[in-house]
Image (spheres, helix red, strand yellow):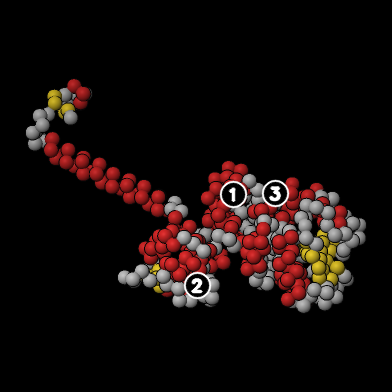
């Protein structure tokens, strides 16, 4: 360290203080303490960032949900070996998971190595009134989609769902793989109308309609409710084979098998022809503009000059507002390319598909209802 000989003189030309000079020690001590405090703050910030980005904690909780750990413990299996047999897991790896769940205060472990659920772990049970097991399990419909969030950067760079970047294709393109997807779809089939879907039942005049095709109808919730409300209707559901199989079971369970059938397949392929109404409910948000137009064209082709295309699409703009808005927007955009389309946007897509507006129904904050024809 140097100090200037005279005020205003260049410090670089000053005299050097001896090591034992009393004016040097306080400076060095305060500087050292200041740097030490800064280093401590930086370390804390770095640790906080690593904690925020931690993938192990959510992965461990989702693994426990997938394996049904909470249900098995609640049923009386409290030892690692018994739990490993019931879950089909390796005992040593499972015990590491269980011990980690203890540190998260989701499990307790006694001196004999027996595990018990804490109150915090209750919602991981399937029979809990506020169960989140289906939501979190990695072989579930939502959990399977959530896995792609590790490649969120793909969505930020391209606007495509993260699933495409991680797996090379979209979620719905891969959902038809094997029996596990069908099981997951069946578990997620609640039968409850969501996102103002009641509008489809009450906001459209079905009195003169004899037949309806629910294009991309998933497990049949809307079609079941529609046929129950309007007993004169007959329905056909179009969806991928795994999903259509679940819908068939749901139709039979609802006592509607004689009035409703399925046409397993993709809505990018030709659809069943000459029905009165082709319903698209909450479909187009999962697809970009080009694909959305292609779906609408298939509906137009099948409807022909006498049929109608009833678009009951969902816009999630209102869901992406408020304090949780940024989080919800990222989550939705990582799963669907266009979660927000206005009524004007939908009309433009339909016009590109060769359709014109015949009737406009009510609009809610999340759903619109528009009838088109050739």
Q: Nearer the viewer, mark 1 or mark 2?
A: 2
Tell me, yes or no, whether the two marked residues, 1 and 3, touch with CB atoms within 8 Å.
no
Label 2 crowding class (10 Å Cα cut-off): few <14, some 14-19, many 20+?
A: many
Secondary structure type for disc 3:
loop
Q: Is residue 216 visible?
A: no
| Residue 112, numbered circle | none
Q: Residue at x 58, y 61 (%)?
A: 139
Image quadrant holding the C terminus, namely bottom right
Which of 167 and 130 lies nearest the eye of the viewer? 167
In the picture, residue 201 is in which quadrant? bottom right
Horizontally, residue 308 falls left or right of residue 105, namely right
The foreground one among 7 and 159 is: 159
**Residue drawn at point x = 69 percent, y = 52 percent:** 173
Is residue 250 among what the camera can see?
yes
Question: Which sits earlier in the primary sequence, circle 1 or circle 3?
Answer: 1
Give the percent coordinates (x, y) of residue 137: 54, 63
- Please tell me whether mark 1 sits on a helix, a strand or a loop: helix
Question: Residue 250, percent across and down?
Answer: 72, 72
C-alpha span from label 1 to label 3: 14 Å
Q: Residue at x 40, y 50 (%)?
A: 50
Task: State how far apart marks 2 and 3 are (Cα).
Answer: 41 Å
The disc, 2 or 3, on the residue closer to the chain's N-terminal end is 2
**Which disc is residue 288 wearing?**
3
Helix, strand or loop for disc 2: helix
Circles 1 and 2 in contact, beta carbons < 8 Å: no
Residue identified by numbered label 1:
162
């Amino acid at each position: 360290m140097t100090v200037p000989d005279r005020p205003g003189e260049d410090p670089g030309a000053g005299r050097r203080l001896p090591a034992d000079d009393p004016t040097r020690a306080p400076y060095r001590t305060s500087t050292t303490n200041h740097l030490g405090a800064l280093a401590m703050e930086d370390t804390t910030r770095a640790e906080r960032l690593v904690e925020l980005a931690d993938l192990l904690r959510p992965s461990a909780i989702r693994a426990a949900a997938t394996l049904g750990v909470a249900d098995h413990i609640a049923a009386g299996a409290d030892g690692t070996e018994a739990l490993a047999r019931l879950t089909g897991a390796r005992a040593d790896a499972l015990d590491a998971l269980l011990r980690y769940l203890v540190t998260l205060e989701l499990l307790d472990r006694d001196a004999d190595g027996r595990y018990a659920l804490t109150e915090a772990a209750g919602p991981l049970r399937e029979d809990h009134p506020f169960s989140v097991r289906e939501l979190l399990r990695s072989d579930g419909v939502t959990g399977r989609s959530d896995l792609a969030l590790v490649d969120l950067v793909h969505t930020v760079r391209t606007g495509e769902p993260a699933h495409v970047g991680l797996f090379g294709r979209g979620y719905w393109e891969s959902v038809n793989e094997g029996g596990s997807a069908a099981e997951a779809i069946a578990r997620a089939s609640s039968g409850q109308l969501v996102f103002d879907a009641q509008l489809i039942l009450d906001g459209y005049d079905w009195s003169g309609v004899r037949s309806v095709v629910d294009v991309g109808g998933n497990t049949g919730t809307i079609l079941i409710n529609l046929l129950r409300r309007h007993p004169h209707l007959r329905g056909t559901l179009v969806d991928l084979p795994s999903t259509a199989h679940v819908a068939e079971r749901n139709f039979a369970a609802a006592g509607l098998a004689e009035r409703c059938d399925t046409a397993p397949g993709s809505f990018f392929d030709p659809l069943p022809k000459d029905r009165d109404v082709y319903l698209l409910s909450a479909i187009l948000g999962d697809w970009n503009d080009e694909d959305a137009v292609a779906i609408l064209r298939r509906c137009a082709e099948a409807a022909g000059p006498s049929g109608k295309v009833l678009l009951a699409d969902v816009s999630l703009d209102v869901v992406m507002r408020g304090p949780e808005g940024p989080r919800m927007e990222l989550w939705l955009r990582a799963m669907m390319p266009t979660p927000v389309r206005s009524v004007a946007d939908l009309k433009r897509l339909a016009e590109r598909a060769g359709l014109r507006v015949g009737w406009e129904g009510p609009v809610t904050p999340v759903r619109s209802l528009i009838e088109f024809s050739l």
